[in-house]
Amino acid sequence: MPAILHRDLVLTDVPRETVDYDIVIYFWQELNDVELSAPGVECLVEKACGLFIWAATACRYIKAGRRVTKEELDQIYTRILLDSIRGDYAEEEKTKLFSLFRRIVGAIVVLFDPLSAKALCELLNSSRQEDIRQEDIKQTLNDLHSVLEIPESQPNPIRLLHPSFRDFLLAKERCQTQQL
């Protein structure tokens, strides 16, 4: 039996121009029945910020004759957050996990300049709260690759993939996941 070649590809390692070009092709292919102008597609690509999940969601709603609303985007983000902390935990464990999640993700969201996991760890440990290890950060962010750029290389910063995620988390009326 011939050997199967396998190569992992991390989209955040692909140049943004390449991803944007692929998203342009995706929009033209998916929306071929919709009357779109080139500037309209450019605007959609810009709003997607390199995220295919955003492009796919936008296509679904454009085909249905609607715009992607904040409410629909909020549902996507809520599902991502709820899926990021799953498991059967005792109440004390849940409280600790949610607190850790809020400290780590909260810091990423409000920082003006993104930090690496190591620098984020140092920043969070400069407070007088319980120490956070780099492994805690890695585990907490493990299921958030659809909303955060989490580099494999330690010196590279952790970044938001789309500013709408920050907007969602910082608006109490939008982020209804009270336990987080």
Image (cartoon, rainbow, N blue to C red):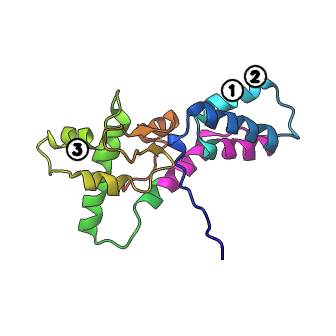
What amino acid type is highlighted by mark number 2? Pro
Q: Which residue is labeled 1 in the image?
A: 43
Front residue (pair 41, 153): 153
Q: Which residue is labeled 3 in the image?
A: 121
The span picked out in magenta is 55-80
Q: Is residue 159 above or below residue 102?
A: above
Residue 161 visible somewhere in the drawing: yes
Q: Which of marks 3 and 1 precedes in the sequence?
A: 1
Q: Is residue 79 above or below residue 44?
A: below
Q: Is residue 177 above or below residue 157?
A: below
Q: Is residue 111 above or below residue 7?
A: above
The label shown at residue 67 is none
What amino acid type is highlighted by mark number 1? Cys
Left or right: where does residue 101 sit relative to residue 11?
left
Look at 43% across and 58% down and name the residue there. Answer: 84
Hey, which residue is sitting farthest top in the picture? 39
Q: Which residue is labeled 2 in the image?
A: 39
Left or right: where does residue 154 sit relative to residue 12?
left
Find out whether residue 97 is within the magenta segment: no
Give the quarter of the image for residue 94.
Answer: bottom left
- Label 2 vs label 1: CA separation? 6 Å
What amino acid type is highlighted by mark number 3? Cys
Front tag of 1 and 3? 3
User: 10 Å neighbourhood of mark 1: few (<14), some, or many (≥20)?
Assistant: few
Residue 130 horizontal/vertical position (percent): 14, 51
